[in-house]
Amino acid sequence: MANKEIDAFAADAAVTGVEVLVVSDAGTGKKVTVDQLVAFAIDEIEAIAASPTLDSGDSVMILENDAVLKPVTYEVLENSVAETMYAEAASGSVIDTDVMLKKDGGVTKGTFTAVQLATYMLAALEPSILDITDLAANATPADADLVMICDGSTPKKTTWLQLKTQVMAGLQAYVLALGAAGAGGDTDIIYVSQAGVQKKMTLLQLATYIGISVTTTGGIAGNLAAWVDADTLDASISLVPVATGFSGAGSDTAVPTTAAVRGEMKTIVSDQSALTAIADADTILVDDGDAGVPTKSTFTKVWTWLWAKVSGATNKAVIIDADSIGIVDSAASDVVKNSTFTNVWTWIASKLPSYAGNLTSVATISTSAGITGGTSINAASSLGTQGKFTLGLVTPTQITANTNNWNPGAYSFIRLDSDGAYDITGMVADTGEGRADIRIIVNIVAGSQTFKHLDGSSDASRQFVSTTGSDIVLAQNELLFCIYDDTDSKWRISKI
C-alpha cells in the first residue's frame, strides 16, 4: 500500500472496538484495537491513588453530550447534583418506606427509611423534649389548663379538670372495692389534709386529738365527748341523768341521757303560758312522715287537712242511734270525746219542752222569750209545741243565665230551677243580730249548677267559700248546705 495520509482515509461512522490503530511500542511499530486501548486507559485510571479529601478545585472528566470529554470541578458537579435533586417534585406525604441517602459513620454510603429516621429522632430527642425540670412551677393549676398524656401509644392532651375527675373516680372505685375493716388498731393509718398538705396519721393520734378537744376550761361549744372505754365517760365530763335536768344556759361539758332530754322537752312545753285563743297562723310541732324529720305546721293547714278527712269520708245516707259524733267535754277540762246520736237526741228532747210554750208562729219569732243568743227562724219555718221543726220551702224565679248576688228569698229550703247549666257567684243573706243564716239548696233540673268559690263577680259579703277550696258543681237532685258566717261575711258551703 502506497504511503497515504490519515486525512485521506474515510471516517469510521461507528466504532465497534475491533478497529485497529497503529502505535509505537518502544520504537517498534505495532497495532492495537480500540478495545485494547480502552482497557488500557481504564487500568491506568484505576491505578491512580484515591484522594483522601475533595475540595472545590478537584476535577473529574465527563463526556459532554456523549461527544466531547471535558474536565469538571467537584464544586460544579456537586451543585449540579443538588439542583437536580431540588428540581424533583415534592412528595405529597411521607410514608414509612420512603428512602433517603446516608453516610454511615462518615465512611460507608447507604440508605435509610422514613420510619427508621422517626425511631432514631424519638430515641435521641425524647428525653430532652420531655425534660420539664427547667419549667416554671404552677402552684394553682386552673381547670382549663392542659396536661400531656399518652393514650396507649398515641400522644394526646387533656384538661386539668378532666384529669382530676378521672383520678377521683379511680380513687373512689378503688376505695369502694376495698374489704371492710374489722376492729381498728392504734397503728392503723388514715389520710388527712393538714392546712392543705396531704399527710397521714394513726387512729391512736386521732383518738388522742378527740380526747383532748373536750376540756373543762374554755367553754368551747360543740366538742365531742371523750370516753375512757365503751361505757365510761372521761373524768372531765359529767353525765346528766333524768333527775337532774338542765339549768341556766346549759353546759358544754355535760352529756344528757335520753331520759333527761325527754324530761327537758316536757318542761319546755309545760312551762309555756296557755294560749287563750288559737289563730290560723299559730304553729304546732308535727312529725313529717314522708321526710322522717320533725317540722311545724299552721292551724290553717291542720284545719284544711282535718276538713278534707271529714268531707272525704264515705257518706252515710241514714243515721242510726248508735252512730257517734265528736264533742268537747266542758265538764272534763275540755277533753275530746264521742257521743252517740241517742245521747244527742236525748239532750235535744230534754231542752225542747221547756221552750215549746213560748213559741209562736214563724212570722213573729225572732228573739222571743225563752230563745236566747239572737236565735231566729227564717220565713215560712215553724216549731211545733211537741218540738217538731219544719223548714220554709220556696221555688224562686227560674235562673236563665250566669247569676251574681242571687236573691232567692229568706227561705231555709230552696228548690233551684233553671233552663240550663249556669254559674252562681254569690247569694243575698238574711243577716243581723249575730245569727247564722242556714239554707239547703236542691237542684231540681237536669242542668248542673256551679257555685263559684270566692268569685269577685258578686259582692264580697255575698260570695261563697267552699270547704274544698274550689268550685262546687251541683247535679240534678244533689243538695248543697249553706251557712252564713256573719263574722267573715261569707257563705260557707258544702255538698251533702
Image (cartoon, grey):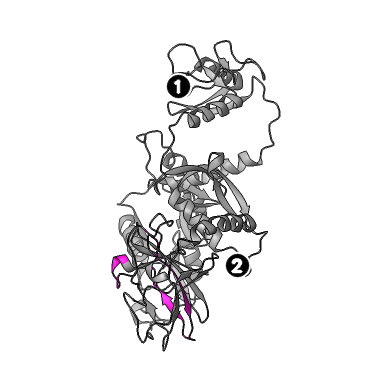
Query: Is residue 195 depicted above or below 20 in this figure?
Result: above
Is residue 172 found left or right of 38 in the rendered image? Answer: right
Which residue is pictured at 47% across the width and 53% down the height?
303
Q: How far from the left and from the top, in percent, is residue 448?
A: 46, 82
Q: Residue furthest right?
A: 182
Q: How far from the left and from the top, in percent, is residue 338?
A: 61, 51
Q: Which residue in the protein does label 2 denote?
A: 315
Amino acid tagged 1: Ala
Amino acid tagged 2: Asn
Which residue is pictured at 38% across the width and 78% down the height?
423
Residue 151 visible: yes
Magenta-span inclusion, residue 454: yes
Q: As rendered, which of 467 and 217 lies closer to the eye?
A: 467
Image quarter in which the N terminus is found: bottom left
Q: Residue furthest front?
A: 357
Residue 105 visible: no
Q: CA distance from mark 2 to mark 1?
A: 57 Å
Q: Secondary structure at mark 1?
A: loop
Which residue is pictured at 63% across the width and 41% down the height?
176
Q: Which quarter of the figure has residue 260?
A: top right
Magenta residues, as a range? 435-461
Q: As rendered, which of 158 and 148 lies closer to the eye?
A: 158
Q: Which residue in the protein does label 1 denote?
A: 221
Query: Is residue 136 depicted above or below 215 in this figure?
Result: below
Which residue is pictured at 41% across the width and 89% down the height?
419
Is residue 58 found left or right of 32 in the rendered image? Answer: left
Q: How far from the left and from the top, in percent, is residue 157?
A: 44, 50
Magenta-span inclusion, residue 250: no
Q: Which quarter of the figure has residue 484?
A: bottom left
